Amino acid sequence: MVGIVVVAHNPKLSEEVIRFCKDLKKDNFKLINGGGIGIGECFGTCPKIIEQAIEAANQGDGVVILCDLGSSVINARKAQESIGNRIRVEIVDAPLVEGTIVAVSANHPKVKMENLIDYIKESKEFPKL
C-alpha cells in the first residue's frame, strides 16, 4: 500500500489533520507526521524528519507527501533526494487538509500510486460554496 506523509510547519497541525482523517482510513497503510523541526514548540520543517517519516510510511508501494507551505515543499524535495531510488516518493500539489482527506479515503491495496496522485490533485478543484 502507498504510505502517506503529512508535512506542516507546526507538527501539531500535521497531527490534527492525521487525527481527523483516521476515521476515513479503511485499510492498513501508514499515515505519518513529517512536520516540525523536532525542537519543542518551534515551527518549521526539516528534511531529516521528513526523510524519517518517509521511511516509516513506506510499505513497499511508495509514499505520497502532502505539504502546507513553500519551505515544506523545499524540505520534502531534499528528503526525496536523500532517499534516492530506495523508495518511490511523490510530493503532491494539493491543499493539505483536503488532499489528505482524499489520500486517506481513496487509498487501498488496488489503487496504484499514479491513480491516487490524480485523485489527490483533484482536491484542488473542490468547490466550497
Image: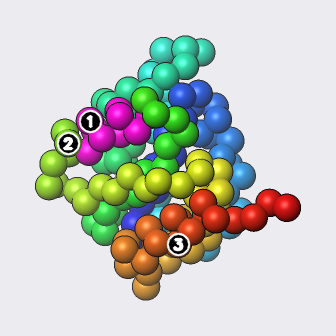
Q: Which mark is residue 81?
A: 2
Element assignment for label 2? helix
Can you identify the residue that label 3 sits on? 119
Looking at the rendering, which quadrant does residue 122 occupy?
A: bottom right
Residue at 69% from the left image edge and 65% from the top image edge: 126
Element assignment for label 3? helix
Neighbourhood count class around disc 1 (C-alpha, 10 Å): few under 14, some 14–19, many 20 upward:
some
Q: Is residue 118 left or right of residue 95?
A: left
Element assignment for label 1? helix
Q: Which residues are magenta?
A: 72-80
User: Reading the chain from its start, which is encountered first: label 3 or label 1?
Assistant: 1
Q: Is residue 14 above or below residue 116?
A: above
Q: Main secondary structure of the magenta part?
A: helix
Give the Cα separation between the discs numbered 2 and 3.
24 Å
Neighbourhood count class around disc 2 (C-alpha, 10 Å): few under 14, some 14–19, many 20 upward:
few
Figure quadrant of the N terminus: bottom left
Q: Position of residue 69 (x, y in %)?
A: 52, 35
Tag 2–tag 1 contact (CB < 8 Å)? yes
**Residue 8 visible:** yes
State the residue in front, 70 or 13.
Answer: 70
Q: Which mark is residue 78?
A: 1
Residue at 35% from the left image edge and 39% from the top image edge: 76
Q: Is residue 32 left or right of residue 63?
A: right
